[in-house]
Amino acid sequence: MELGESTLHDSPASSQPALANIKESNPLDIWNRCLENIRTRINAQSYKTWFEPIVPLSVDDHTFVIQVPSEFFSEWIEEHYYSLISECLAQLTGRELSIEYDIIPDDREDVTIHILPETPQQRLQDQIVNTSSISSELPRSTLYQPQPAIHPSLNPRYTFANYIKGESNQFARAAAMAVANNPGGTSFNPLVIYGGVGLGKTHLVHAIGNHLLHTHKTKRVLYTSSEKFTVDFVESIQKDKVGEFSAYYRSVDLLIVDDIQFFTGKEKTQDIFFHTFNALHQVGKQIVLSSDRPPKELQGLNERLISRFQWGLTADIQPPDLETRIAILRKKSSDEGVDLTHDVVEFIAANVTSNIRELEGCLIGLLARASLENRALNLDLARDVVRSIIGEVRSHITIEEIQRAVCEHMGIPEDILRAKTRKQEVVNARQIAMYLSKELTNSSLKTIGLHFGGRDHSTVIHAYQTVEDLMKTDPRQRTTVQQIKSKLERNYR
Ligand code: ADP
Ligand code: MG
């Protein structure tokens, strides 16, 4: 039966049935006309969200069946739009039709009407769909839109397991682990990690992403840099795809943005980032950021962004202390399958102090030169490599070298300095070595103590004072100390 325009629009619900034989009517036709009416009665956003995704399935004398994406969706329709829909249907059909829902199962999220069971009626409907104003690629609401495929862009080597813990990064690392275990569920949102170049910010933020993906495979994790975010945004403007850009970044469970200092001065990008941030934060998604300085010192960054960044937790990474540098070198060299001697590790760690990337550079340089120049992996080679990387050798003497020199001079085995023994001659040697360590290296009292069998800093202070006092009163002691000291200085300066 033909659907006459006049009957469609003009007949009130109570008038003559517009469609005498509903069974023969096509549900899509009825629905399209129903939509024309509905579209004029609700706002565009609601229409797009709640009506565009609906697929009309069937109609008979009593029921109109529509397909909806989820249970939640059907409840929402029931609560907010039931009367509107039934009123429109009644106008069209002249009947009080009840509305029934066919819910797309979760694992069929992506189903389109093309792969519904193929009945003759269905085939017909397909054809109509293909030529109707509702295209076969039905616009879908953001609510159940199949989410865009995501590539997390994570470096699989940057894990917590590979991240050496030290005093300098302890707090940032603990915060990162808390976030990785419970993204969006801690008050650390956003988590902002800041610190100087080459101190492990990128590694740590990747570790969060890798951990989450490892424990929850379906979570959507996205790592990006502020520069990449900016480039993507500009490109999306050029291609008129800002909507897609926005939807992509908003679809994630964990958004990691590295080096946010490069957002400074980029007003438009900051603007879209601000909205992205808000959208994610509002729904409890986790945001992790890194910066080369504390957010409040980021000049050229919008105040409202800075204040957002301070909502969560800001954790810094400091330059690594000697122990951490040694541990990192040991770990990295053993990963490379080489066993560096103590003195080489100590020498590099003592000299390359400010940057872990440089530390790695030294190790790589060392291995490269050892194999290319066929040289032994010894202190000589380490000296050459360090000099070529940091320009000069800054600190010449390591605690180990001091210990060796003291023991050699006093004729005692080296490891005894680290042992518990209280024999007078050993105590004396140990105190001299501690004294010289304090005099000739930049190591902290704590570090020095650790090199002597894990003694604490007060023992080092005591040793230092004892030796200083003895040097004033005991000429033999003074000579011993001075001889060792000048020998060390000859060798290492
Ligand atoms: P940033 O982003 O702060 O400039 P990166 O994260 O790129 O620094 O770190 C530089 C290099 O040092 C990387 O190869 C990283 O794996 C390594 N690194 C940094 N901190 C650690 C650490 N605590 N343990 C092991 N490797 C580290
Ligand atoms: Mg980095």
Image (spheres, rainbow, N blue to C red):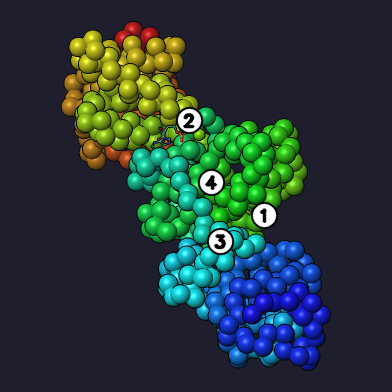
Q: Earlier in the sequence, mark 2 or mark 3?
A: 3
Q: Nearer the viewer, mark 3 or mark 4?
A: 3
Spatial CA span between label 3 and label 4: 41 Å
* SS at circle 4: strand
Q: Position of residue 32 (x, y in %)?
A: 67, 71
Q: Is mark 3 within 8 Å of ligand 2?
A: no
Spatial CA span between label 1 and label 4: 14 Å
Kindly identify the amino acid type of the residue bearing the numbered disc 3: Asn
Q: Is mark 2 within 8 Å of ligand 1?
A: yes
Question: Can you identify the residue that label 2 sits on?
Answer: 198
Q: Nearer the viewer, mark 2 or mark 1?
A: 1
Spatial CA span between label 3 and label 1: 39 Å
Q: Residue at x 23, y 38 (%)?
A: 419
Question: Can you identify the residue that label 1 sits on?
Answer: 278
Kindly identify the amino acid type of the residue bearing the numbered disc 1: Asn
Q: Nearer the viewer, mark 2 or mark 3?
A: 3
Q: Nearer the viewer, mark 3 or mark 1?
A: 3
Question: Can you identify the residue that label 3 sits on?
Answer: 130
Q: Earlier in the sequence, mark 2 or mark 1?
A: 2
Kindly identify the amino acid type of the residue bearing the numbered disc 2: Gly
